[in-house]
């Protein structure tokens, strides 16, 4: 299967989709120069079509799977939630879908998309003859020490005329406040209570123990966040990096929080601010894996 990626960022969603479907990356469409540098580092032979709003889709290689973690600013509760925001670009993504006709479409956005914009996305997909499932899965449900609730959608091309006319993308979620529980009506995560309990053990800040005069600095003091950090260490199979260096947040720690392979972003020659910006906007890899699995189980079951 061939995978095309829109609004690719550092490729976090792409990694999960490649793994889930056994797909091979065919092309990206990413405008940010720093993110593009990360993509070129990991997929050097894969073309980047740049600005998806200016792409001639008739000239783009067809793909079996199309993934898009499109801009969240128009829908985020942290922003103005303006429907006229120029970053609300799903209409351009729909143009690409209508021409390329991939068998599978995978979408990701903030949980606030449920109450603003998602209905239009679902309706557009239905109008194009796609059916599927959508829902909210948090990073904490995958065991991460932070909540990061996100909206996910898997839609597939209708298999027959009747299904195409029905054109539905079923939603299994009700939006809940960012500080609340998951509200997930989907299948229960089978990895056990350790992960399901993560929702209430999240890291908001990281602190270091201050050494007394003449005392060697001790290890990172996680305080009440210790169980969440240790759980994520077990899940990822590697220890947490130091969260702070010289009083500043360490990008390697954020990369670890996002569940990425070690050095995925930090080994690329970028400024500290560029790394932190893309990591803050990117996809948590284990969370994406879990969301894809849960939605696929619902579709098949």
Image: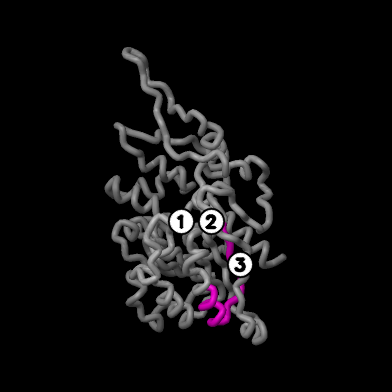
Give residue 62's position: percent from left, percent from top: 47, 78
* C-alpha distance separating marks 2 and 3: 17 Å
Q: Of marks 1 and 3, which one's residue comes earlier in the chain?
A: 1
Q: Which residue is mark 2?
A: 288
Can residue 196 be found in the magenta stretch? no
Which numbered dot is residue 12? 1
* C-alpha distance separating marks 1 and 3: 24 Å
278 or 267, nearer to the observer: 278
- Please state if 275 lies on the left or on the right of 102 as rendered: left
Which numbered dot is residue 171? 3
- Which secondary structure, mark 1? helix
Identify the image's colour scheme: rainbow, by chain, secondary structure or one colour: one colour
Which numbered dot is residue 270? none
| Residues under numbered marks 1 and 3 in contact, where contact means CB atoms less than 8 Å apart | no
| Residues under numbered marks 2 and 1 in contact, where contact means CB atoms less than 8 Å apart | yes
Q: Is residue 289 visible?
A: no
Identify whether 199 is placed above or below 185.
above
Callout 1 crowding tier (Cα within 10 Å): few <14, some 14–19, many ≥20: many
Give the quadrant of the C terminus: bottom right
Q: Which stretch did the figure color magenta? A: 122-136
Identity of the residue furthest to the left in this view: 271
Identify whether 293 is placed above or below 5.
above
Location of residue 104 by image quarter: bottom right
* C-alpha distance separating marks 2 and 1: 8 Å
């Amino acid at each position: 299967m061939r995978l095309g990626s829109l609004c690719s960022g550092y490729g976090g969603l792409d990694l999960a989709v490649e793994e889930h479907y056994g797909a091979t990356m065919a092309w990206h469409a990413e405008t940010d120069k720093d993110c593009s540098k990360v993509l070129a580092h990991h997929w050097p032979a894969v073309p980047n079509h740049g600005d998806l709003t200016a792409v001639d889709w008739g000239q783009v290689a067809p793909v079996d799977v199309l993934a898009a973690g499109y801009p969240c600013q128009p829908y985020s509760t942290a922003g103005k939630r303006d429907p006229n925001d120029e970053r609300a670009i799903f209409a351009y993504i729909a143009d690409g879908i209508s021409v390329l006709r991939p068998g599978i479409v995978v979408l990701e956005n903030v949980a606030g998309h449920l109450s603003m914009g998602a209905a239009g996305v679902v309706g557009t997909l239905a109008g194009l003859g796609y059916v599927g499932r959508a829902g909210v899965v948090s990073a904490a449900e995958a065991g991460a020490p932070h909540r990061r609730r996100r909206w996910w959608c898997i839609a597939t091309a209708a298999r027959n005329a009747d299904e195409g006319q029905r054109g539905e993308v079923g939603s299994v979620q009700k939006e809940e406040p960012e500080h609340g529980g998951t509200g997930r009506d989907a299948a229960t995560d089978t990895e056990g209570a350790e992960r399901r309990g993560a929702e209430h053990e999240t890291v908001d800040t990281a602190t270091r123990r201050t050494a007394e005069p003449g005392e060697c600095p001790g290890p990172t003091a996680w305080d009440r966040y210790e169980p969440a950090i240790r759980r994520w260490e077990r899940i990822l199979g590697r220890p947490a990096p130091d969260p702070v260096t010289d009083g500043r947040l360490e990008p390697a720690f954020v990369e670890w929080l996002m569940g990425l392979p070690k050095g995925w972003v930090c080994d690329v020659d970028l400024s500290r601010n560029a790394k932190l910006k893309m990591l803050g906007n990117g996809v948590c890899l284990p969370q994406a894996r879990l969301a894809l699995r849960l939605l696929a189980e619902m579709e098949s079951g």
